[in-house]
Amino acid sequence: MWFSTVSKAFLGLSILSGVTLAAQLSRALTTTALSVNGRFIVDTSGQRVKLRCLNWAGADKTKIPEGLQYQPVDATALWIFENGFNCVRLTYSMDMALDPTQTVHAAWVQAAGSTAYLPELMDTFSTAVGKNPWLQNASTLEAYGAVISALGDHNVMVIMDNHNSHASWCCSLDDGNGWWDTDAVYNSTNSRYFNTARWLAGLQFMANFSLSHPNVVGISLRNEIRRGEDQDVDGTHAAWWDNIPVAAATVHAGNPDALIMIGGVDYFNDFSFLKTKPLNRSEFDNKVVYEYHTYSWGSDAFGDAYVTSSTQTNCTPFNTYLDEKVGYLLEEGKPYTGPVWMGEFGWSQVPQNDTTEEVYKTCLIEWMSNNDMDWSLWALQGSYYFRTKEVDMDETFGILNHNWTNFRYPGFLNKIGKMWITNINV
């Protein structure tokens, strides 16, 4: 496998205004698979590879990656590369993985669900075909693969993420995708679509599929595991322990070169339980990466003690929270030591008068920069084909504008500037 690493061009830079990231971050490719050395992701020569990724959604009802009605896939892949990002977390559903021959056209008709949405949604399909003629007769899996290939053509790595089982918007405690249906307590509201056997079969299929796409360097087992009412009430996370090692072994058997991205519990907001009971990674010890997610609304560290005023920021409570939940995994030489990849984080790209979100951004960027984290921003997409019964829905968290032509917020790269820097090496 190959990857594109990012140079140390930002070391010592304090002002990024006017900097062209593509020029600053370009570097020759190396043919290799990625693996793990302590808290770092490395190549076969032992050199660190820092993931700087974007989330590209593809797990909603239309079952293909978003945005093809606005841009040819090659144009979006090139934009990602030219702006300095070296990888994409590309989401998919098990509905797509386990019905790989369904045509994109049929998936969109199915997504509409009723004649009320059908004409407008199918107009969007026609527009997407106009931009990407190969979509006309493509299957959903072929469309997913075409996006991966386009990213590969522009030296962008891919981490395939099983976002859900039932293709839909994620994530809530009533969408049926949250927790394994084989748990001792079955909660249909949270688990009705999360069929464990189908999930494992889908992971096996997608791991095998990834072998034909050499820029797929990692596979994320499942997005934001979340327990519903009466599930995991004793806090032992028995279902997690029963299923995550099996899933990791399934992926590793299908593609031994791929990194295995493993999330914790409570929407990937908690890994604290591994400190006293580390995950046995002996079967694939040099492939496991811990995946963590955080948003301004997803941490109990926020509150009056955190936001001291509209002009003063106290990051200590949030930093302490992150250290306890996940940061400790970065400490070298421990039974649990491993890379932590911030697989999702983000904020509105439309400036708002939201003190909590501003403090969240400031403190998270500081914490991630100080820890030299690997990361994946939510999100690339500026809009959706069809989300929660709305055709062409806008995504204010998307760094692309609605029409996928350029940054929604021009100052974004300056905002996260320190996060580009690699300041800790193997």
Image: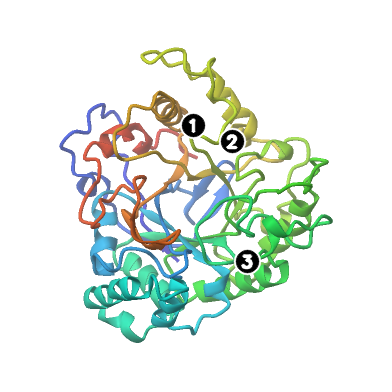
Which residue is disc 2 drawn over? Answer: 330
Which residue is disc 1 drawn over? Answer: 371
Alpha-carbon span between mark 2 and mark 3? 24 Å
Residue 251: mark in rendering: 3
Does label 2 or label 1 sit earlier along the sequence? Answer: 2
Dot 2 lies on which element?
helix
Q: Quadrant of residue 149?
A: bottom left
Alpha-carbon span between mark 2 and mark 1? 8 Å
Q: Is residue 276 left or right of residue 123?
A: right
Residues at marks 2 and 1 touching, judged by CB atoms closer than 8 Å? yes
Does label 3 or label 1 sit earlier along the sequence? Answer: 3
- Label 1 crowd bin: few (<14), some (14–19), many (20+), radius 10 Å: some
Residue 230 image point, x, y percent? 79, 47
Residue 86 image point, x, y percent? 36, 53
Residue sitting nearer the eye, 120 or 93: 120
Q: Quadrant of residue 251?
A: bottom right
Dot 1 lies on which element?
loop
- Label 3 crowd bin: few (<14), some (14–19), many (20+), radius 10 Å: many
Q: Is residue 374 left or right of residue 37?
A: left
Amino acid at circle 3 = Val
* Placement of 348 over or under 320, stated as above or below: below
